[in-house]
């Protein structure tokens, strides 16, 4: 596979007989699959070759490479005088780290976990396994829970038997003051799940679960934030149809604006989820519920154009992938929100709320309501389990509200 990036047989032979042996060939295969350009892949291979040659001179075998070895290599580069190797490029350590990650994923080495980054990793692994087996929790939810639980362990210590009610309450209250209600709600839910796991395993007192306070929140208390139809069209028109990135972003914006998909739905879409012959798109939403939505002509044409002219070649089966190597699926729903945020800036549209991707979902529901759609119709498109979730959009139906509004006492009606 090295011959994919190097034209000289002599250079390929020199790489294969070096200290890394055939490992560089496997690394080259990974780079080729990820879609790296020739010049970029050469740089990463050269960095890996330099790293292994330096480690060999230091008496460090390939099987004993660690994160500490990478740090020592980074210090070496500042004073490197190795023949045949350049040391001024900033991506050398990055290329060496990619090589080490490749060796770890291939099972050739096993890196030690840095304790400061992952507090009590064994406890976190056991918690995630317990949640998967007992509650069927998906990985994205576990990731969100893990953010708050790791912070808890850093704040209160890594010994659950020493947790107390006062410390847990203070942790929740401080989180509520630093973020919005939704994030604070996720924190309280994560802590309750974690405490239930600890109680089931006999690692903390059973009464601690009652120490997590319930955050006050009133349903339907706020108004849904949305964009006007003209603003939505400006967002979609802001995408460059002559670039692969523009084709991808336009298809994503249309799915959000026309079908009301969530950012997470976009991330999890697969190529096989589109029924081109029947004109349907299959979406796996919250709770892993499978739903079939009609594929509008405009959306279908945008997807076809992206697949033909914008989507890079990759072995990933996800519908949307990154536009730069490595060509793989989006890491999380945050990538979709970033695409919408960039479109808002390009179109010079003011954001009425902190959200981005969900803003288009609210805009679709509001537009449907003003065009005469019923709440049942909107609930079907948005895939709400209960009509009560959709009732919040009744607040923005000003025309219907005028018919039932009562005049203020002692004031003439309008």
Image: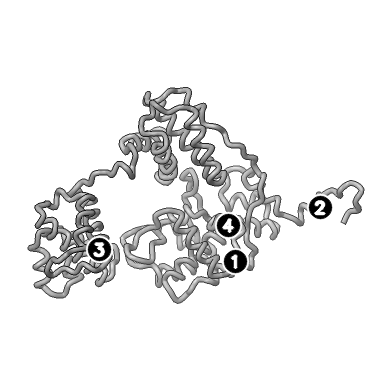
**Vertical position of residue 375 compared to residue 31: above or below:** above
Q: CA distance from mark 3 to mark 2?
A: 64 Å
Q: CA distance from mark 3 to mark 1?
A: 39 Å
Residue underneath mark 3: 31
Q: Alpha-carbon neighbours of circle 4 within 10 Å: few (<14), some, or many (≥20)?
A: many
Residue underneath mark 4: 359
Q: Earlier in the sequence, mark 3 or mark 2?
A: 3
From the viewer's perspective, tell me whether residue 87 is left or right of residue 117: left
Residue farthest left in this picture: 17
Evaluate if marks 1 and 4 touch, with contact meaning CB atoms under 8 Å apart.
Answer: no
Evaluate if marks 2 and 4 touch, with contact meaning CB atoms under 8 Å apart.
Answer: no
Q: How far across and how far down the image is residue 410, in percent?
A: 92, 48
Q: Earlier in the sequence, mark 3 or mark 1?
A: 3
Residue underneath mark 1: 349
**Vertical position of residue 162 compared to residue 411: above or below:** above
Residue at 19% from the left image edge and 52% from the top image edge: 69
Q: Earlier in the sequence, mark 1 or mark 2?
A: 1
């Amino acid at each position: 596979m090295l011959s994919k990036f190097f034209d000289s047989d002599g250079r390929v032979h020199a790489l294969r007989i070096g200290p890394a042996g055939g490992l560089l060939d496997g690394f080259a295969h990974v780079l080729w699959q990820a879609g790296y350009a020739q010049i970029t892949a050469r740089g990463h291979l050269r960095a890996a070759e330099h790293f292994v040659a330096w480690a060999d001179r230091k008496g460090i075998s390939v099987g004993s490479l660690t994160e500490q070895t990478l740090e020592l290599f980074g210090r070496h580069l500042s004073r490197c005088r190795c023949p045949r190797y350049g040391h001024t490029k900033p991506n050398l350590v990055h290329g060496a780290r990619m090589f080490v990650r490749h060796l770890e994923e291939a099972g050739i080495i096993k890196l030690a976990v840095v304790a400061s980054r992952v507090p009590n990793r064994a406890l976190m692994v056991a918690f995630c396994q317990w949640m998967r087996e007992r509650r069927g929790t998906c990985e994205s939810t576990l990731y969100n829970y893990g953010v708050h639980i790791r912070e808890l362990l850093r704040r209160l210590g890594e010994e659950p038997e020493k947790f107390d009610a006062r410390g847990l309450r203070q942790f929740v209250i401080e989180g509520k003051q630093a973020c919005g209600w939704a994030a604070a709600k996720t924190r309280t839910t994560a802590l309750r799940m974690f405490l239930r796991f600890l109680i089931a395993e006999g690692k903390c007192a059973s009464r601690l679960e009652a120490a997590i306070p319930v955050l006050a929140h009133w349903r339907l208390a706020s108004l849904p934030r949305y964009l006007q139809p003209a603003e939505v069209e400006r967002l979609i028109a802001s995408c460059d149809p002559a670039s692969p990135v523009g084709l991808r972003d336009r298809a994503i914006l249309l799915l959000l604006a026309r079908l009301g998909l969530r950012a997470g739905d976009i991330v999890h879409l697969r190529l096989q989820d589109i029924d081109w012959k029947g004109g349907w798109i299959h979406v796996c939403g919250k709770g892993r519920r499978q739903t079939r939505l009609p594929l509008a002509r405009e959306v279908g044409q945008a997807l076809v154009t992206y697949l033909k002219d914008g989507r890079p070649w990759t072995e990933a089966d996800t519908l949307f992938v990154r536009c730069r190597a490595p060509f793989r699926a989006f890491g999380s729903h945050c990538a979709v929100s970033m695409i919408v945020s960039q479109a808002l800036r390009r179109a010079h549209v003011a954001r009425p709320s902190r959200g981005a991707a969900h803003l288009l979902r609210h805009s679709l529901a509001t537009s449907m309501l003003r065009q005469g759609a019923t709440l049942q119709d909107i609930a079907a498109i948005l895939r709400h389990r209960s009509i009560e979730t959709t009732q919040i959009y009744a607040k923005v139906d000003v025309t219907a509200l005028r018919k039932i509004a009562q005049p203020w006492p002692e004031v003439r009606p309008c």
